[in-house]
Image: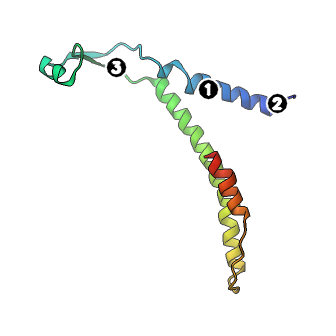
Amino acid sequence: SKMTLPEKKLISICKWIGGNVLFSELLESDQRSPLITFQIPELITKFLGMGSGKLGVVAPSIQFWLAIAVILAIWILVSLVISLVSYHFIILPRKLRKKSDDNKSEDIFEITPYLIGFGLLMPFC
């Protein structure tokens, strides 16, 4: 089947995110050189079961924090879409129905909010 241009762009964006952010070498191994190294006393290393007792402090990885920020931004956008759908299809219709039914004592059961909430939003989350 032929893909449209927006579908191709969405797939290319998802591949870039998957290759550069989610499954990159940033999370595999750390090859940075320590800025400061120091020795832990032998009594503590034996108690903790550490090897040589030599530790180092490395500078923060800008690429790693940028990847975390991109993942956070993506999750914010997904949460925004979920919130908008739930507000417009679940909360707002109930408010409008309640205002129009203030004088009526009968409660009308509507299945649409439940279908959207339990059938669309919850499986997506």
What residue does disc 1 label? 18
Query: CA gap, disc 1 to disc 2?
Result: 20 Å
Relative to 34, is 111 above or below?
below
What's the residue type where badge 3 is placed?
A: Val
76 relative position to 28: left or right: right
Residue pictured at 70% horizontal, 56% vertical:
116
For residue 123, which numbered disc appears in the image?
Answer: none
What residue does disc 2 label? 5
Task: Give the mark nearer the N terminus: 3 vs 1.
Answer: 1
Badge 1 crowding class, 10 Å Cα cut-off, few under 14, some 14 to 19, many 20 or more, is few
Query: CA gap, disc 2 to disc 3?
Result: 44 Å
Report which quarter residue 99 is drawn in.
bottom right
Task: Give the mark nearer the N terminus: 2 vs 3.
Answer: 2
Query: Can the viewer see residue 16?
Result: yes
Residue pictured at 57% horizontal, 44% vertical:
76
Q: Residue 35 placed where, x, y %?
A: 31, 16
What residue does disc 3 label? 58
Residue pictured at 66% horizontal, 57% vertical:
117
What's the residue type where badge 1 is placed?
A: Gly
Task: Give the mark nearer the N terminus: 1 vs 2.
Answer: 2
Query: CA gap, disc 3 to disc 1?
Result: 26 Å
SS at mark 3? loop
